[in-house]
Amino acid sequence: MATNDKLIEKLDRFVRKYYKNQLIKGILYTVGLLLLMFILINVLEYFGYFSTVVRMILFWSYLAVVALFLGVYIVLPLMKMYKIGKRISYPQAAIIIGKHFPEISDKLLNLLQLKDMALSSENSDLLEASIQQKTENLSPIPFLKAIDLKQNKRYIKYAVVPLGILILLLILSPAVIKEPSNRLMNYNTYYEKPAPFTYHVMNDSLVAFQQEDFLLRVKVEGNDIPNDVFLVVNNIEYKMTKDDMTTFSYLFKNLQRSQPFHFEAVEAGSQ
């Protein structure tokens, strides 16, 4: 192989490593940012219970960002590693190498300029000799060392921290991720936000004797206790008696027959 060809081969290997470095850095950035965005969107949906329109916007926006990051930070560097698409030129590579090896910066650029001149010159014997000499002088320089892939270790934290947060959420409170993820994927489905309280019937038995009174007692538990609770029987509302802050009761007088019921409430602060 000619000495000049060896120089070009060294530059090609450098350019390949340059894009490999970009690929590694891009993967770490992409993983970190997409995980962080995934967590943020899920947390917002977990507390917000957004409408179908908002969930649709969030869902497709996230997919668009995923596609953008994969394309820009992963697919493009991969393509350029394999000489697909426009890559940095040899003079640009020489500038990058020169920043790491200042002693050869001008020499390498000058050598590339001489090679261009030799291609267009009719009498290039002197130029070829000069190129040969300069190339031999630069051949011991390890161009690849101008890029240290180990430097990417400092970017690992950008991927590890969001990943750690996601794992902790899945272990400590999986509902924060699983429930909103399901709602976001099924963005066309309407989901009613659950009440911030639950009802617990305190009676040991709901069996009552006909034509006798029956006292139904209910305890309400949750983060936001309602002011009033209504018993709905045959689509008719009956306000329950508030025994204390969390306990309500209703007396069925002279019970005649089985009466299916459910509860409704006026939340604290409502009018």
Image: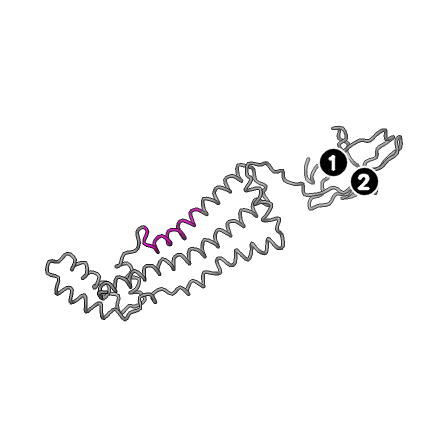
Residue 72 falls inside the magenta stretch: yes
Question: Quick check: 46 left or right of 232?
Answer: left
Give the magenta range: 67-84
Vertical side of 238 occupied by 2: above or below: below
Provide the secondary structure element on which disc 1 rests. strand
User: Overall secondary structure of the magenta stretch?
Assistant: helix
Q: In which quarter of the image is the C terminus?
A: top right
User: Most extreme residue toward the front, as rendered?
Assistant: 1
Question: Quick check: 101 left or right of 173?
Answer: left
Question: Quick check: 253 left or right of 17?
Answer: right
Per the image, the residue denoted by label 1 is: 263
Q: Which residue is drawn at 16% across and 57% down?
A: 119
Q: Label 2 vs label 1: CA separation?
A: 12 Å
State the residue in front, 163 or 225: 163
Instruction: Write down the quadrant of residue 165 in the picture.
Output: bottom right
Per the image, the residue denoted by label 2 is: 217
- Find residue 259 and report its horizontal and vertical position in percent: 80, 31
- Find residue 47 and report its horizontal and vertical position in percent: 60, 45
Instruction: Write down the quadrant of residue 135 in the picture.
Output: bottom left
Q: Which residue is drawn at 30% across and 51% down?
A: 86
Provide the secondary structure element on which disc 2 rests. strand
Instruction: Write down the quadrant of residue 1 in the picture.
Output: bottom left
Q: Residue at x 67, y 41 (%)?
A: 195
Give the mark count: 2
Amino acid type at image mark 1: Phe
Amino acid type at image mark 2: Arg
| Label 2 or label 1, whichever comes before in sequence order | 2
Residue 167 falls inside the magenta stretch: no
Question: Quick check: 126 left or right of 220?
Answer: left
Characterize the local packing of mark 1: few (<14), some (14-19) or many (20 or more) Cα atoms within 10 angstroms.
Answer: some
